[in-house]
Amino acid sequence: MRILDSIDDALIAELRAQSEFFWLDLTAPSAAQVEHLGQLLGLHPLAVEDSVKFGQRPKLDTYGDTALLVLQGGIESQPEDENLHPLEEIHCHLSGDFIATLHRNPYAELQNLTTTFSHSPASKTERYYVYKIIDVVADSYFPILADLDDEINALEDAIVSGAGRRELEETFRLKRLLLKLRKAVVPMRDVFAREIEVIADLAGLEPDSHDYFRDVYDHLIRITDELDSYHEMVAGCTDLYLSTVANKQGETSKQLAIIASIFLPLSFLTGFFGMNFSWEVGHVLVGPWSFFLLGLGTMLVSAGFMWWWFHHKGWTGNDG
């Protein structure tokens, strides 16, 4: 199989005349280039229009002997919750003579695959090459899922250690990322569930096992299941955050209640001995002993007794 990274009219015409299967991978093609490629490869006008505009959801449209397969590839980043561009839209124009992949930005998985194909001495079937290109796009989500697993576990530990605004923001970012990934993966899974045989039976593709494309479908099912489980884990992080915040508020309220309870008898004592009745001032509150014993002494004894009582009831310790 020949691999091209630019539109070479003469070479493409020669390869098609010789019925030699080739892969054309274009990065950031202009509208004029896409339209010229459509004329050169005989693509359907509607397929050309979709590739000019991009912004398509994953789908498979067949036009006689050619088909347009729109995929969403994953882009790994560290950390994943701050990944502003986690997806790359890839248009695959398929036929028995060629496969042309178009994408707006350089895509590392396809670049690595071109290197793999170039250094592979063994010749494979056309259907195998189509499968491998689709497979690397589908498998691009697995590194993202591995990173998400680590980030969600770290987030849970951080929330338990001390839930703050940062953890709450990270939780919401993960929710949005998981929703975005799921919106990309589920339509791809549905395409391969309904029309898996359409790709394998395109006219001109060298016959081979249909199990290749079932393997892609199995991968997409696994990715979808993991995304659903991670979404539940992040929802659990939200519940854990709310529970942790409620526990903190309860602990603070308990401490304030203990302080208020200790000061309650102190307020009573200071109020009682602070009354300026003549008999009390003249007969009871006389001499330094009254200040130290009746004043400070009763307040210390009262505060100490209240603290002992709360400690005895187990109200002064942490819940954990």
Image (cartoon, rainbow, N blue to C red):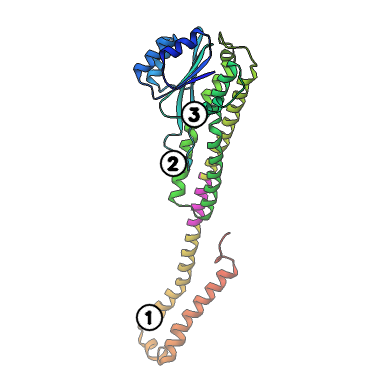
**Magenta stretch, residue numbers:** 238-249
Residue 111's mark? 3
User: Which numbered mark, 3 or 1, is in the foreground of this view?
Assistant: 3
Under mark 2, the amino acid is Glu
Q: CA distance from mark 3 to mark 1?
A: 87 Å
Residue at image x 35%, y 18%? 31
Provide the secondary structure element on which disc 3 rests.
helix
- Amino acid residing under circle 1: Gly
Q: Which residue carries the number 2 mark?
A: 82
Residue 125 as seen in the image, left or right of residue 78: right
Disc 3 to disc 2, how far (Cα)? 24 Å
Disc 2 + disc 1, Cβ < 8 Å: no
Q: Earlier in the sequence, mark 3 or mark 2?
A: 2
Q: SS for tag 1?
A: loop
Return the x and y of residue 54 as percentages of the image width and height: 40, 21
Residue 296, percent from left and from top:
45, 83
Which residue matches tag 1?
Answer: 274
Magenta segment: does it hold 55?
no
250 vs 289, nearest the viewer: 250
Quarter of the view holding residue 209? top right
Q: Is residue 25 rendered to the left or right of residue 226?
A: left
**Magenta part mainly helix, strand or loop?**
helix
Q: Can you say whether 52 is above or below 136 in the image? A: above
Quadrant where the C terminus sits is bottom right
State whether residue 73 is above or below residue 124. Answer: below
Q: Verify whether residue 243 appears in magenta.
A: yes
Is residue 83 among the parts visible in the rendering?
A: yes
Residue type of the residue flagged with mark 3: Gln
